[in-house]
Amino acid sequence: MAFGDYPAEYNPKVHGPYDPARYYGKIDTPFTQVKVGEIGGWLARRNKSPNAIAGAFSRAFWRWQHKYVQPKRTGIAPFFQVTFAGMLFFYVMNYGKLKHHRNYKYHW
């Protein structure tokens, strides 16, 4: 599969119009229905290639887009989500500098 191509499992005659938020591969047990003893086998069945990981992030992005950004009457939620994600990202990025500015209590 080259960059920008449809997934190999996608068949337009079977699946209809392409949806970037849908996984077209073999259906497996959802993680929420996996028992504790079966987690190892469930993880072993996952495709861990860079293309599969990029596809998972792409599907998550498009699901977020379809739910929060692209509806006809969207609210302010996606703006707050992007703002919070940016704040969290820059806090983690600057944590090494911020930890030196803590207020310590030197007495009991």
Image (cartoon, helix red, strand yellow):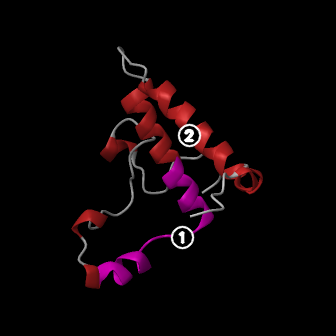
Residue 36 falls within the magenta-colored stretch: no
Q: In this view, does 43 lie to the left or right of 79?
A: left
Q: In this view, does 45 lie to the left or right of 7?
A: left
Q: Residue furthest top?
A: 73
Find the distance from the CA under tag 2 to the CA under tag 1: 25 Å
Q: Mark 1 points at which residue?
A: 48
Residue 42 falls within the magenta-colored stretch: yes
Q: Is residue 33 above or below residue 66?
A: below
Name the kind of residue labelled 1 in the image.
Answer: Lys
Q: List x then y, in percent, for residue 47.
A: 49, 70
Q: In this view, does 70 lie above or below 39?
A: above
Q: List x then y, in percent, for residue 103.
A: 66, 51
Name the kind of residue labelled 2 in the image.
Answer: Ala
Q: Name the residue under label 2.
A: 85
Q: How many marks?
A: 2
What residue is rendered at 38% in x and 53% in y?
24
Quarter holding residue 42? bottom left
- Please tell me which of labels 2 and 1 falls first in the chain: 1
Q: List x then y, in percent, for residue 21.
A: 42, 42
Nearest to the observer: residue 31 or residue 22: 31
Secondary structure of residue under mark 2: helix
Residue extent of the magenta highlight: 38-57
Q: Can you tell which of label 2 and label 1 is closer to the viewer? A: 2
Q: Can residue 19 be seen in this view?
A: no
Nearest to the observer: residue 69 or residue 26: 69
The quarter of the image holding the C terminus is bottom right
What residue is rendered at 56% in x and 31% in y?
83
